[in-house]
């Protein structure tokens, strides 16, 4: 259950940073509804390019720096959102077979700030 909650948090974070869409209805019934993103217009007006990337990896065991941390299959999602030199990344490891006493689930967040 904890793994599902952590996975849900990662997916919500990815959805938030990738530009959730909001539908704004016009007052005129015949008009087509207008679709906008939460930050899209602001970023476009200020010429800010945003890059979103992600991965979803599956492995048959979790090995970190040569050490076996979990002998069960694992799911390791990650995402990165970057703009104007700043970046926010998230990475996770989730044990897909909780049949042992190892608690290898983790979520890491990284914030990169450019150094001038």
Image (tube, grey):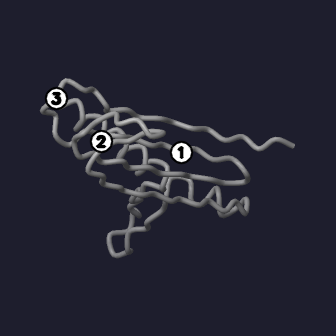
**Quadrant of image for the N terminus:** top left
- For this orientation, the residue located farthest to the right is 116
Residue picked out by circle 1: 89
Which disc is residue 7 wearing? 2
Q: Position of residue 65 (x, y in %)?
A: 48, 39
Q: Who is closer to the viewer here, 103 or 36? A: 103
Between tags 2 and 3, which lies in front? 3
- Mark 1 Cα-neighbour bin, 10 Å: few <14, some 14–19, many ≥20: some
**Residue ID at (29%, 41%):** 8
Q: Position of residue 5 (x, y in %)?
A: 26, 34
Q: CA distance from mark 3 to mark 1?
A: 29 Å
Secondary structure under tag 2 reads helix
Q: CA distance from mark 2 to mark 1?
A: 15 Å
Question: Does residue 107 lie above or below 26 as drawn?
Answer: above
Could you tell which of marks 3 and 1 lies nearer the N-terminus? 1
Q: CA distance from mark 2 to mark 3?
A: 20 Å
Residue 69 shown left or right of residue 1 in the figure: right
Residue picked out by circle 3: 100
Q: Position of residue 32 (x, y in %)?
A: 37, 74
């Amino acid at each position: 259950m904890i793994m599902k909650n952590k996975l849900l948090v990662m997916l919500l974070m990815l959805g938030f940073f990738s530009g959730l869409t909001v539908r704004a209805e016009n007052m005129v019934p015949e008009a087509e509804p207008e679709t906008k993103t939460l930050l899209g217009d602001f970023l476009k007006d200020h010429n800010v390019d945003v890059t979103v990337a992600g991965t979803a990896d599956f492995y048959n065991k979790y090995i970190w720096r040569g050490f076996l941390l979990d002998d069960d299959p694992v799911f390791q999602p990650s995402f990165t959102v970057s703009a104007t030199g700043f970046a926010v990344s998230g990475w996770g490891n989730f044990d897909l077979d909780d049949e042992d006493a190892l608690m290898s689930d983790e979520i890491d967040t990284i914030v990169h700030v450019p150094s001038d």
